[in-house]
Amino acid sequence: MLETITPQPPDKIIQLSQMFRSDQRENKIDLGVGVYKDVQGHTPIMRAVKAAERRLWDEETTKTYTAIVGDGGFHKAMGNLVLGDSAAADRLSFAHTPGGTGAVRQILELIKTAAPDATLWLSDPTWPNHPAMANAVGIPVKTYAYFNSETRSVQFDNMMADLRMAEPGDVVLLHGCCHNPTGANLNKAQWGGLAMLLKERNLTPFVDIAYQGFGDGIDQDAYGVRLLAGKLPELLIAASCSKNFGIYRERCGLVITVSRDAGQARLTQGMLSRLNRLNFSFPPDHGARLVTMVLTDPALCADWQAELKGIRDGMAGLRCLLADALRAETGSDRYGFVAEHRGMFSRLGLTPEQVVTLREDYGVYMIGDSRVNIAGLSPERIKVLARAIVAVGG
Ligand SMILES: Cc1ncc(COP(=O)(O)O)c(C=O)c1O
């Protein structure tokens, strides 16, 4: 059997990390993998998470399985974080999953089961795992225009024109905030226009929110998802706790669905339970316990919010420093968008050849489409980076 297996294409981001690790140059810069790093290049455990972990060590009395869709306290705390009071609690259903990736996968399974003829519409570009997983589940995919590589901003009119061609019943995947890989996001008016179109055309929104709190603020980053929850009869949400709680390896994510009414929500809950059972049975508990403790203890929550604000402000500051340095080096404002974008990523708009030259000649590592992880920068390296970008013709 195994002899039929053919070599699989290597994951480009993991490959890039390996190349970075084996690069002996001291002044190399890693702008590749999407993990937050502080100015020392370290991915810290957040203070409130560490405190919760100590408490859990004392208080936890059993390691028996949690519920099949995870713990109700976790659902409530995360439902509140993501949705606030935008949808009635009895319309919500939940499934705790291994990471946001697991949540995306379970939603795709749900779509395949509930709407086998639906097409999934993805932004161009999007996180590469979106089309890859849709393909693995057998869901047809189409793309809608999103990022204008000339202006490095959202081409909203073209996006709307493409989505007008979607068939009623199709599903539209949207990044809740901090679009990966571009960093370009919808503004409030655009979310409003989009909500109207989705409703008119009977399209189901599917919001992937993996960076809540990394953009403009916890509530600000949830503006779009909350608007859709308030205005549309149905909504699918994949939330990740990896980045905003810094618990990447604990694999903590959540499916939240908003159904038309309480009766439908109960049926949806039953299907989510079944899908968890079929795919991995019980979710990992540790990360969810920590998140629940942090969100429900006022002191821990305040400290988490303060640390998250520090992370967010730090990245916004790095963005401004990089935009300024590029303005000084190029004598133009063509990289001004770096300061406007939000979250960890921006797509610089360099050619694949320029990306390779930056890596080989300057030890600067970024994804082939010129996506950079802003958190990979430190203030003292920004000038060096700006000079290198200009030197390769960027
Ligand atoms: C857009 C998007 N969705 C989902 C995820 C899932 O993250 P995780 O599975 O680590 O929680 C990521 C992480 O890179 C992402 O960028």
Image (cartoon, grey):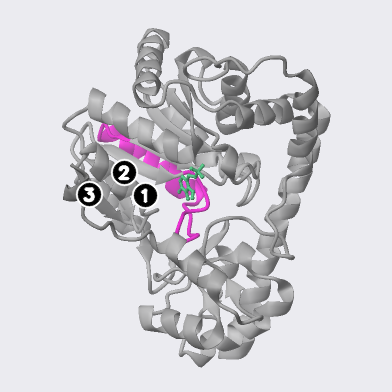
> Looking at the image, which residue sits at the far top?
263
Mark whose residue sits in front, 3 or 1: 1
For label 1, the SS is helix
Relative to residue 385, is residue 139 depicted above or below?
A: above
Disc 3 on helix, strand or loop? strand
Closest to the observer: 109 or 333?
Answer: 109
Q: Which label number is shown at residue 133?
A: 2
Residue 274 on image: x %, y %: 35, 16
| Residue labelled 3 has its Cβ within 8 Å of some atom of ligand 1 | no
Residue holding disc 1:
129
Q: Earlier in the sequence, mark 3 or mark 2?
A: 2
- The residue lying at 49 percent from left, 33 percent from top is 98
Q: Check disc 2 and give the amino acid type.
A: Met
Span highlighted in magenta in the image: 176-204
Regarding mark 2 in the picture, which secondary structure is present there?
helix
Q: Earlier in the sequence, mark 3 or mark 1?
A: 1
